[in-house]
Image (cartoon, rainbow, N blue to C red):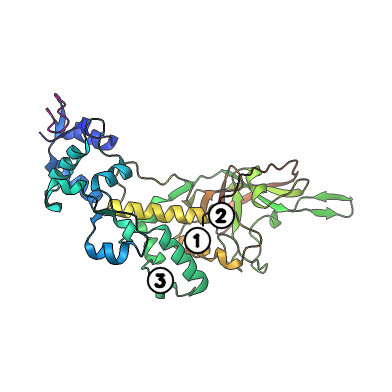
């Protein structure tokens, strides 16, 4: 008889049981005349979930956990419920949930109550086979302060960005910008027509990618000496991005996309809807991909301190270079300064500047909150 649809909260798993199950009485919640599926038929779905957790041994507890500030162990039931809310806690108590887990994969356990014992960890707590925020911090520190052009020689944590940014990851963030889309580029200032005694916006040829002879300090995406085209999808955002001040007069170009362009899109909401049906070879892989993309997107989007050292841009510049080499024509990410999105193009070959106008900033609004130290 097995488990029924009422035993679970996961909508995709419920749909799976409805398609493949038979009408019967549930062994666990005792619902009658409902679609049920045997534990054996659920095993293949749960393997990826069980793979995320490990039992604590004495050596790990005594020599590793406390030193590395790993959280206290919990039961497998509590971890799975906290992470995924798989089981219907209103119909199943923890003992019944433990029985379901045991009967799905009895080879993992010596007895069903093991799933209720406080000896389980998330594998990510031990940094086994996961990309985590800790990995990103190590990568950023290493590439800024230890080794830059031969990065793979020095990552003691095993994070190789050239391998991590693989075909699956690139495909997950792939999107298109369609021909005809209108974007905006802004520059602080204008030119003065001394003959007519008026100010004019910069001409269109001055609103594309800066000439490589103009060596900037680099930006979030482009390293010094390699210039990209920074645009946004609305005017207020593009003005915010150049830190336009109240009363300032700025040149704003309207830019038309002349062909469909393949972009690396970080504006999507990267999340796992169900742990049972993923886009990747394993649930672990999907968790890693989402962690990587969110870490990269956060660094690319976060506000830039104008007094920041140029080396703080290096991690995102490095990843953007990987994205460019693969063949993407741009990167899209959320602006932290405006309500719109930023789109950075590696070339301006497929854009046309339709017009450039002068705009003056009338007002700037600042919102604040009390700062709470994270230390």
Q: Secondary structure at mark 1?
A: helix
Image coordinates of residue 176 in percent, x first then y, are 47, 47
Residue name at image x 24 percent, y 58 percent: 56
Dividing the picture into quadrants, the one containing residue 359 is top right
Q: Is residue 271 visible?
A: yes
Left-right relation of 350 to 168: right
Q: Residue at x 46, y 55 (%)?
A: 295
Distance CA(mark 2)–CA(mark 3): 29 Å
Residue 285 appears left or right of 101: right
Q: Earlier in the sequence, mark 2 or mark 3?
A: 3
Q: Tell me the number on the disc at residue 320.
A: 1
Question: Would residue 26 be counted in the magenta stretch?
Answer: yes
Residue 107 pos. (x, y %)? 12, 52
Helix, strand or loop at label 3? It is loop
- Observer-nearest of 335 and 136: 136
Mark 2 → mark 1, Cα distance in angstroms:
10 Å
For the residue pair 172 and 86, the one nearer the viewer reads as 86
Pointer 2 residue = 344
Q: Which residues are magenta?
A: 24-33
């Amino acid at each position: 008889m097995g488990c029924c649809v009422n035993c679970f909260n996961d909508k995709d798993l419920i749909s799976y049981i409805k398609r493949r199950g038979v009408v019967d009485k549930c062994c666990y919640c005792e619902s009658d005349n409902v679609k049920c599926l045997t534990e054996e038929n659920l095993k293949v779905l749960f393997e990826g979930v069980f793979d995320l957790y490990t039992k604590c041994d004495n050596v790990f507890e005594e020599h590793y956990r406390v030193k590395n500030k790993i959280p206290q162990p919990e039961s497998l039931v509590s971890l799975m419920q906290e992470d995924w809310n798989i089981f219907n806690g209103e119909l199943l108590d923890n003992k019944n949930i433990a029985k379901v887990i045991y009967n799905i994969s009895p080879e993992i356990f010596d007895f069903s109550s093991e799933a209720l014992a406080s000896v389980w960890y998330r594998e990510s707590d031990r940094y086994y086979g996961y990309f985590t925020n800790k990995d990103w911090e190590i990568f950023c520190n290493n590439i800024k302060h230890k080794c830059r052009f031969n990065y793979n020689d020095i990552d003691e944590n095993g994070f190789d960005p050239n391998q991590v940014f693989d075909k699956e990851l690139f495909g997950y963030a792939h999107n298109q910008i369609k021909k005809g889309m209108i974007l905006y580029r802004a520059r602080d200032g204008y030119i003065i027509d001394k003959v007519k005694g008026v100010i004019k916006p910069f001409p269109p040829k001055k609103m594309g990618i800066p000439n490589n002879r103009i060596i900037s300090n680099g930006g979030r995406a482009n390293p010094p000496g390699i210039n990209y085209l920074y645009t946004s999808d609305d005017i207020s955002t593009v003005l915010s991005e150049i830190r336009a001040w109240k009363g300032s007069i700025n040149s704003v170009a309207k830019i038309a996309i002349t062909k469909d362009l393949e972009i690396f899109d970080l504006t999507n909401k990267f999340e796992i809807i169900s742990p049972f049906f993923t886009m990747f070879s394993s649930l672990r892989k999907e968790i890693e991909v989402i962690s990587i993309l969110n870490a990269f997107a956060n660094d690319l989007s976060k506000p830039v301190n104008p007094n920041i050292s140029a080396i703080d841009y290096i991690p995102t510049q490095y990843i953007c270079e990987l994205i460019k080499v693969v063949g993407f024509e741009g990167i899209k990410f959320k602006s932290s300064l405006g309500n719109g999105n930023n789109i950075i193009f590696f070339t301006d070959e497929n854009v046309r500047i339709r017009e450039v106008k002068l705009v003056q900033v009338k007002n700037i609004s600042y919102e604040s909150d009390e700062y709470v130290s994270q230390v």
